[in-house]
Image: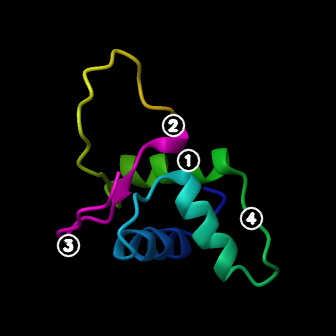
Amino acid sequence: MVIVEGLLLGAVRVVNAAGKAAHAENVRVQLGEIADDGCYFDVWVVADDLAELESRGKLKLAPAFDWGSRESTPKARIAYVVPGKKQEPAG
């Protein structure tokens, strides 16, 4: 992982609490807002770290609407939630 786990989980919580989907693009913006130097992480780094936390059980995939598409969701657009709390992020 590149990003500190606690910061990443906190950013997911804040994004979800704001009613937004916690995908890499939105989480990246939140991380940039709390960074000491105001720098933003690369969206693909955020996406990889979110996927790693999901694989370790620290995050779970957010409920998603099935549009019936055969194409997979781009990695940067996969939304997550922190398990343990009922959260309904927006699409």
As helix, strand or loop, the secondary structure at mark 4 comes to loop
Whichever of labels 2 and 1 marks the residue nearer the N terminus, that label is 1
Q: Amino acid at mark 4?
A: Tyr
The residue lying at 33 percent from left, 58 percent from top is: 90
Q: Amino acid at mark 2?
A: Lys
Q: Which residues are magenta?
A: 75-91
The reply to whether discs 2 and 3 touch (Cβ–Cβ < 8 Å) is no
Whichever of labels 1 and 3 marks the residue nearer the N terminus, that label is 1
Q: Residue 23: image x %, image y %?
A: 47, 53
Q: Residue 46: image x %, image y %?
A: 60, 54
Crowding at dot 1, Cα within 10 Å, few <14 / some 14-19 / many 20+, comes out as many
As drawn, the label of residue 40 is 4
As drawn, the label of residue 47 is 1
Q: Which residue is mark 2?
A: 75
As drawn, the label of residue 85 is 3
Q: Which quadrant of the view contains residue 57? A: bottom left
As helix, strand or loop, the secondary structure at mark 3 comes to loop
Magenta-highlighted stretch: main secondary structure? loop
As helix, strand or loop, the secondary structure at mark 1 comes to helix
Closer to the camera in the image, 79 or 18:
18
Q: Amino acid at mark 3?
A: Lys
